[in-house]
Amino acid sequence: MTKRTICFVAGLVMAWPLFAQAQYGTFTKEQRILFTRQNPYPRFEDGRPRVPDEILERMKQVTIEEAWEVLRSHRYNSQFEGGWLNLHPDRVLVGRAVTASFMPLRPDVDEVTRELGRNDNQIGPQNSWVIDTLVENDVIVVDLFGKIEQGTFAGDNLATSIYAKSKTGMVVDGAVRDIDGIMEIPGFNGFVRGLDPSGIAGVTLMGINIPIRIGKVTVKPGDVVLGRREGVIFIPPHLAQEVVERSENTRLRDEFGHQRLREGIYTPGQIDVRWTPEIQADFEQWKKEREKK
């Protein structure tokens, strides 16, 4: 079993006959592909969707509202989660989700987790196992069930490792510690529920790169994470391109509208409502001329 397939989704194999050949309690590459079967992009070795870097770069200009409207139009109604402590509100967080699930420690379950970790040559505490899997443009997304005291997924050392590997940051439904050191990491950002001086304790890792719950959102491995001032929205890979294209078109329309208002060609009442066919035609012509330049 590889580092990316350490997971223990209780009852999953029993629930679906399709998984009858899988080892009990594990999430295989085939299952990961099945749960993300609408993904149109290449995949990592473990089956996690790999949204192209070019899409991720364009996603940095997308607003939460623009992404939200696209997702709602496809009946993805619960993909946004607010109520975070945003460590750097001036920074945008974008990347591919690497998910991790923790649960309150139960000795017999934790014993199995540790045994499987030893078999996989894992070193260090269980939160570091997740960090070891990161590559550039990943965003670690951790379900720590809102735990604050002893729910500190990372301090400044682990946060430094997260940034060194991913060049992004983290979303933790839990806490962090050593905040002064974390705040000094250039380019890093984090969305967390709170701060606490304690170390992480009383929890057991239950899965890496499995579907998890963050607040009211179901997050799957490979989802595009977009974090801005308002909070975090999780975008399914098959909708990522539509999100960036709709956003880019909105920005073009805004640029056109502002220009025409400055020129006095249209009034605010004409621009700030559904455009007439004449204004739409003017926009299409303006766009063609802009592309030529």
Image: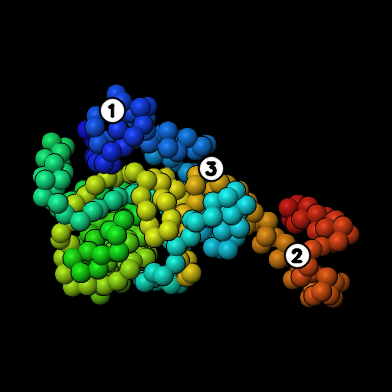
> Which residue of the protein is positioned furthest toward the front in this rendering?
15
The reply, left or right, for residue 139 in relation to residue 25 is: right
Mark 3: few/some/many CA within 10 Å (<14, 14-19, 20+): some
Give coordinates of residue 241: x percent, y percent.
57, 47
Quadrant where the image shows the N terminus = top left
Q: Which sits earlier in the primary sequence, circle 2 or circle 3?
A: 3
Comes first in the chain, label 2 or label 1: 1
The reply to whether the C-beta atoms of the residues labelled 2 and 1 are less than 8 Å apart is no
Label 1 environment density (alpha carbons within 10 Å; few <14, some 14–19, many ≥20): some
Q: Amino acid at mark 3?
A: His
Residue 35 in view (yes/no): yes
Q: Secondary structure at mark 2?
A: helix
| Outermost residue toward the right in this view | 278
Say which of marks 2 and 1 sits in front.
Answer: 1
User: In 3D space, how far apart are the residues under numbered discs 3 and 1 (Cα atoms)?
Assistant: 27 Å
Q: Give x and y (percent) for residue 68.
A: 56, 58
Give the CA distance from mark 2 to mark 1: 56 Å
Q: Give the amino acid at mark 2.
A: Phe
- Residue that numbered label 2 is attached to: 256
Can you say whether 210 is above or below 139 in the image? above
Q: Which residue is mark 3?
A: 238
